Amino acid sequence: MFKIMFVCHGNICRSPMAEYIMKDLVEKENLSTDFCICSRATSTEEIGNPVYPSAKAELERHGIFCDNQKRAAQVKSDDYKKYDMILVMDCHNLRNISYIFPDDKDKKIHKLLEFAGCGDDIADPWYTERFDIAFNDIYKGCTALLEKLKKDGIIKDREKL
């Protein structure tokens, strides 16, 4: 099982959107049993809060529904050894996660859009109010990530089995 953690500042907008987009992508390819997917925050300010209503609504516009029990949680220092890949949304998340995981010796930490061929940040829709743009960027990153995992043989493509 390949374990992925998506990380943003508060775990109420971008990282839960990424969590549920990725879960939807792997479910559509019959790969759900090959993955453990979650999301976390680098900060403590939103801990315990549900997915932000505008993020949830944007997911629903695309036919993706998140668990009503989902609550913001913070990354813990022992999470590094539990996950195969830790994906952040922007350079600020990257900096903040370095305080939690000071040594990325296994090269597990990446910005999500690296897999889409760029290292761009995914703008925080909490500030921009552009949940549509965040969704599109996250979807692009998650789709590219899944293709890379299949191409690299980390996840077997069920269509070819």
Image (cartoon, rainbow, N blue to C red):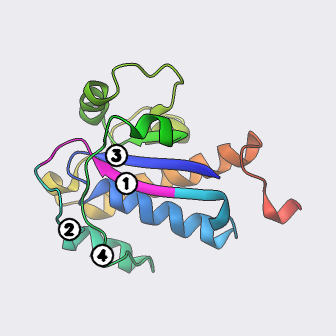
Most frequent secondary structure within the magenta stretch: strand
Q: Amino acid at mark 2?
A: Tyr
Which residue is under mark 3?
7
Q: Which residues are magenta?
A: 37-44
Q: Secondary structure at mark 2?
A: loop
Q: Looking at the picture, how far across and down is residue 36, in whole percent? A: 54, 57
Q: Are marks 1 and 2 in contact (CB under 8 Å)?
A: no
Q: Amino acid at mark 3?
A: Val
100 is higher (above) or lower (below) than 132 = above
Q: Earlier in the sequence, mark 3 or mark 4?
A: 3
Q: Are marks 2 and 4 in contact (CB under 8 Å)?
A: no
Which residue is under mark 2?
52
- Distance of label 3 from label 1 (alpha carbons): 6 Å
- In the picture, measured across the screen, residue 60 lies left or right of residue 71, that is right
Q: Which mark is residue 69?
A: 4
- Distance of label 3 from label 4 (alpha carbons): 18 Å
Identify which residue is drawn at 21% across, 56% down: 125
Q: Secondary structure at mark 4?
A: loop
- In the picture, measured across the screen, residue 117 lies left or right of residue 138, that is right
Q: Earlier in the sequence, mark 4 or mark 1?
A: 1
Q: Amino acid at mark 1?
A: Ser
Q: Which of the two marks, 2 or 4, is nearer to us in this view? A: 4
Q: Looking at the picture, how far across and down is residue 135, in whole percent? A: 37, 61
Which residue is under mark 1?
39
87 is higher (above) or lower (below) than 11 = above
- In the picture, measured across the screen, residue 69 lies left or right of residue 136, that is left
- Distance of label 2 from label 4 (alpha carbons): 13 Å
- Distance of label 1 from label 2 (alpha carbons): 14 Å
- Is 41 in front, or is 144? 41
Q: Residue furthest right?
A: 161
- Residue 60 visible in image: yes
118 in the magenta segment:
no
